[in-house]
Image (spheres, rainbow, N blue to C red):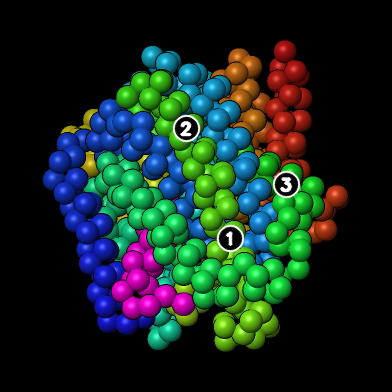
Amino acid sequence: MSFIDLSIFIIYMILMLGVGFYFMRRNSGQDDYYVGGRNIGSWHIGLSVVATDVGGGFSVGLGGLGFLMGLSGSWMLFTGLLGAWLAAVFLIPRVKSNPDFEKFYTLPQIFQHIFDRKVSILAAIICFVGYLGFTSSQLLAGAKLAAGTFKPLDLNVALLIMGIIAVVYTVLGGLKAVIYTDTVQWIVLMAGFIFIGLPVSYYHVGGWESIRETLPAEYFSLTNLRWQDLANWGITILPIWFVGMTLYQRIFASTDVKSAKKAWFIAGLFEWPIMAFMGVSLGLLAKVAFEQGLIAVSQEDLDPEMGLPILLSTVLPPGIMGLMMSAYFSAVLSTADSCLMAASGNLTTDIFGRYLKDKKDGFVMRMSQLFTLIIGSLALVIAIQMTNVLELMLYSYAFMVSGLLVPIIAGLFWNMRSPLAAMTSMIIGGVVTAGLSMLDLNLPFGLDPNFFGVFSSLAVFLLVYRLQK
């Protein structure tokens, strides 16, 4: 990376920190810090939702899928489209129009309202652990991008840089800083993909004829995947739209039901087909470059998720490279900051809330900032121990889905409000998924541990509920 690239990147990061400082001076309490004053418009919410959900992890992960399997990798985000639109139709009216929820900040507060405080604390712990891992995956994604494009930079040093920037402006500005920077970051990312990454990479590898001659036909097919791939993505990604703390924060931050639903429809369309095909197409071009010998890494040493940043560092001229890297780091930060806010909200509101409820708003906000700083530091430590962005991200999703999906659906939609059934299903679902993941067994039909965690959670919930009746 040249001096001009580095200068552009540094200026961009300073601007992001400036946004955090600006909103720090304007935030007056928890309503501002955690739910943006509850009056943010649909386009800002929608772009923030898609930036958070896709973000750096899926940007890097989609590039890795495009490298390994071609265009069929785009189906991963089709499950995001389905999840967003189902949540818009069914979840948002239930949550946003309920007057009992109008002062809530977090998902576990809904658990407390439906069940009891013990259930809400367990939900908060599950959310906290899940978003801690998810934040780590985003920091790792950013570090991989930095290390792949700026050769002298060590991966761990890159992690420290990413962690400090993401944590500082999130600590300062809260959800308003997160949502407004997400809007800018998503526009920068899309512009970088459309006007820089795709056309320059396409030209550099020799155009369509060269691409077709280099890769086998299945790379251009939408059927180059197993049914298990689609099933595993579906059971992990689609339900997150019903249990994601970051998404509930944005429902609470929306002006009204209509505005929130519009935001979710916008987010779904940006996920698939727009982002899905751009991400895998760039990964596919990285595979072409690798096969042509343009990426000077051996087959044994190449991490598929590093193929794309290495390609961009090879093909982009000075100046343009800095803009494209700013675009990619935008994606990383847009998810990392939201996950930090979610985990911080769990600690401040759900776990330590009873100790802070009689304190002044200024003190509570300072504690919120302290929790955000501590969580960001923990996420950085976890990221240093991991190697695969998509794997860490999907593990985090799976843990939250298997623990939270069944009780929230049962309580909100089926009016089955048994605290004991909720508690046992959350424990069993989370333990089964985590246990099978750690054991790394060959599971039936090639399905992910999350499948067995969700169905175990459902079976236990129904059993306990029936026994109580």
Label 1 is placed on what type of residue? Ser
Label 3 sits on a secondary structure element that is helix
The circle on residue 230 is: 3
Quadrant for the C terminus in the image: top right
Label 1 sits on a secondary structure element that is helix
Label 3 is placed on what type of residue? Leu
User: Residue 27 or 345: which is nearer the viewer?
Assistant: 27
Q: Within the magenta stretch, is there residue 132?
A: no
Q: Within the magenta stretch, is there residue 323?
A: yes
Residue under numbered circle 1: 281
Residue at 41% over, 60% down? 195
The circle on residue 264 is: 2
Q: Position of residue 239 (x, y in %)?
A: 61, 37
Local crowd size for mark 2, using a 10 Å CA cut-off: few (<14), some (14–19), many (≥20): many
User: Residue 434 or 340: which is nearer the viewer?
Assistant: 340
Left-right relation of 387 to 168: right
Label 2 is placed on what type of residue? Trp
Q: Position of residue 107 (x, y in %)?
A: 46, 32
Give, as a single range, the part of the protein colored magenta: 315-336
Image vertical order of residue 257 relative to residue 132, above or below: above
Which circle, 3 or 1, is nearer the viewer? 1
Residue at 16% over, 49% down? 22
